[in-house]
Amino acid sequence: MKSKASKGFIFEKKQQKTFDSLGRGSASGNAHQDKKVFLLLFFQKKQVLLACLCFLLLTPPALAQDAEPTGPQPTLPTEPLTIIGDDGTKHQFTVELPVTQIQQDTGEMFRTFIPADHGMLFMWPQPQVSEMWMKNCPVPEDMLFIGADGTIKGIAEMTVPYSEKTISSGVPVMATLELQGGITAALGISVGDKVIAKQFGGG
């Protein structure tokens, strides 16, 4: 016959077995829960990476807007322009029209020749002090600063190639016209002459 002590020992063993079983069940439950959390975090990170990749693929590169030009731009749309001297002499030009920011920033850069009857007309959204430079421009230019009424307010003749020195109109103007260097002196174009073009209500 078994003593009470023996019964107590058997009960304690059964109880310990039950606790061990519960402990193992709890540990197993925790491991399962940890696995679920790990998988959730993994898929969340994966979704974030996929979203970032899609953003990079679908977003147009800003570099295209901000990159510094490395060569001459293609010929831009043109329009006729006439300069009338104080003696009534008319000088006919064909001028390119840079419209976008990158077209204006590039301008005549890297062009090794400007025909005598060609130029580039930079129109500003409103009268402003026009500040130009000759960075990456290999040939001299004449820059004519034009008021809103088409009157030439100032001329910078034979600008220095590649110079990064600011060439300013000094007064608010509506446009800047770049021509072949030395052409204004050769044709007798001077401050006060009138520019006739569609942009100034004529042409």
Image (tube, helix red, strand yellow):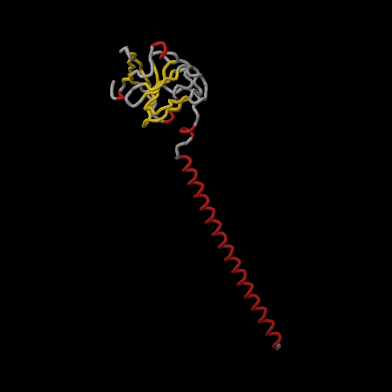
Q: Is residue 10 above or below residue 100?
A: below
Residue 82: name its quadrant: top left
Residue beneath the point at 41% across and 27% down? 171
Depth check: 47 or 196 in front? 196
Q: Does residue 103 appear in this view?
A: no
Depth check: 194 or 71 in front? 194
Q: Does residue 147 appear in this view?
A: yes
Residue 132: x and y in percent read 46, 26
Q: Is residue 147 above or below residue 33?
A: above
Residue 161: x and y in percent read 51, 19
Q: Is residue 107 above or below residue 188?
A: below
Horizontally, residue 169 falls left or right of residue 36, namely left
Residue 7: x and y in percent read 68, 85
How many discs appear? Answer: 0
Judged from this view, the residue extending furthest toward the left is 202
Residue beneath the point at 50% across and 49% down? 48
